Image: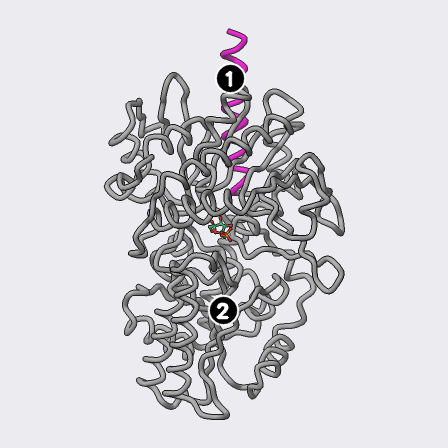
Amino acid sequence: QNLLREALPGAEVLIVSNREPYIHNRSDGGVVVQTPASGLVSALEPVIRACGGTWIAHGSGDADRETVDERDRIAVPPEAPAYSLRRIWISEEEQDGYYYGLANEGLWPLCHIAFVRPVFREADWRAYEKINERFAEAVAREAQTDDPIVLVQDYHFALAPRMIRERLPKATIIAFWHIPWPNAETFGICPWKERIIEGLLGCTILGFHTRFHCNNFFETVDRFVESRIDREHGTVTLGGHETFVRAYPISIDWPPKALAAQPSVEECRLQTRRSLGLASDVMLAVGIERFDYTKGILDRMKAVDLLLTLDPSLKGRFVFVQAAAPTRSRLPTYSRLQSEAQELAREINARHGDESYRPIRLVIRHHEPAEVFGLFRAADLCIVSSLHDGMNLVAKEFVASRDDEQGVLVLSSFTGASREMAEALIVNPYNIQEMAEAIGMALRIPANEQRERMRLMRQRVRERNVYRWAGQMLIDAARSRQQRRILDIA
Ligand code: F6P
């Protein structure tokens, strides 16, 4: 946290993201505040709490839409205000084009290797351009200095860095791409590839989770845009403007806020099993995320199915809980996935269970962080089987939740997190046999070995926490601001 304050004393900080940190919805005549299931929000919220500033995001709840103007600032978090939230209201039609269309039917499948075909429509692109412009205007309107630090988040805003640069030429713009960046051949599918690259190259610093994604980006720029690339120093120069491209592996708050009010691990184990109607000695595996096809939810359910076939002695003694938050449900790929998962859970439960035993519990609803942490603490193992994932913060949160140093993480090799968490059981989620064996093995790992593995993972996540992620970017930003001042004086 000190790193943040030291890096840029007194600088004005603005965040731009699609997802807002607090969603206000009407419920039973009152208003409920929801924390969205979003890696981006879990990473950035503690950072802006620590350094203060303004967060500009799409207003997604239904409670304030008619009463809160785009120019109104809301002090958040509600219980202890530390920064301002500014909502941008987007019409349903704009949302269809910008968010559901270009961002989630186009760029999301383009960047994730999950073999879902990206869809690109001209009208979606126009909506995407328009919304990026709207957010860039909001940044210019909101900025109180001519050189703020603007943190532009994710694939929803590839054009915004250049648009902000046109309005605030002296701004330090840091863009972070929270999802993987594919190879040049794949990115070449996108009809607006040059515009996206040029948009991103409006920023001062462009961050990816891994070195591998940075290399893919360099290769893509090299293929499609006339520019100067210096791989040794990690820079791309386009039209006289230099962008520094670097890997900043994202992380979580340590210790996470949601951990503070948790009962003991023993109590969590008992409470969770009681609420699921299970005996206290039933072994529990959990999977917790948004219901997204990139997360490999069907694959892990198939692995549980195979495990119960290979080792029938587990019947009645082992249960897998999949907590999945509905997401992007208006898109057919997402609604189909939900029905397929429900069908698969029914089949597996029919095959291995009876009236008193259901090995798969699929809980499709939003879970607040406290509930997520309660589940993590109750579990014997956590399965993260993403088919492709930039980082995956669920893996890090599971480890952070286990202050008892117990529990096993089964982790896909196609997550950024697997590069930092070698003590997990690393699996290929496309290999169901391997995953089933890993889950079986996780259930047999003795307590002392669990402790050794967990201790090392916890140590690494604690050291490489989200303040270090943000601090490193801000240190690089401070260096670039200093260089600019020297050049201005010269
Ligand atoms: O983890 C990648 C990510 O795009 C986040 O950055 C985002 O908040 C999250 O997925 C959830 O998606 P959505 O905001 O569409 O619900």
Residue positioned most to the top: 490
- Residue 240 appears left or right of 460: left
Give how far across and how far down residue 213 sits, in percent. Answer: 35, 42
Which residue lies at the image location 56% right of the left edge and 44% below the top edge?
A: 91
Q: In what quadrant of the picture does the N terminus appear? A: top right
The magenta segment is: 469-490
**Residue labelled with disc 2:** 451
The picture quadrant where one finds residue 89 is top right
- Any magenta on residue 479? yes
Specify how the rendered protein is coloured.
Answer: one colour
Badge nearest the viewer, 1 or 2: 1
**In the rendered structure, which amino acid carries the disc numbered 1?**
Arg
Residue 283 in the image: above or below residue 246: below
Mark 1–mark 2 Cα distance, whole angstroms, equals 49 Å
**Residue labelled with disc 1:** 484
Label located before the other in sequence (1 or 2)? 2
Q: Main secondary structure of the magenta part?
A: helix
Give how far across and how far down residue 46 sits, in percent. Answer: 62, 47
- Residue 84 appears left or right of 485: right
Identify the secondary structure beneath mark 2: helix
Residue 73 in the image: above or below residue 33: above
**In the rendered structure, which amino acid carries the disc numbered 2?**
Arg
Q: Residues within 10 Å of mark 1 (few under 14, many from 20)?
A: few
- Any magenta on residue 116? no
Which residue lies at the image location 67% right of the left edge and 27% below the top edge?
A: 10
Give how far across and how far down residue 436 sits, in percent. Answer: 33, 75
The picture quadrant where one finds residue 29 is bottom right
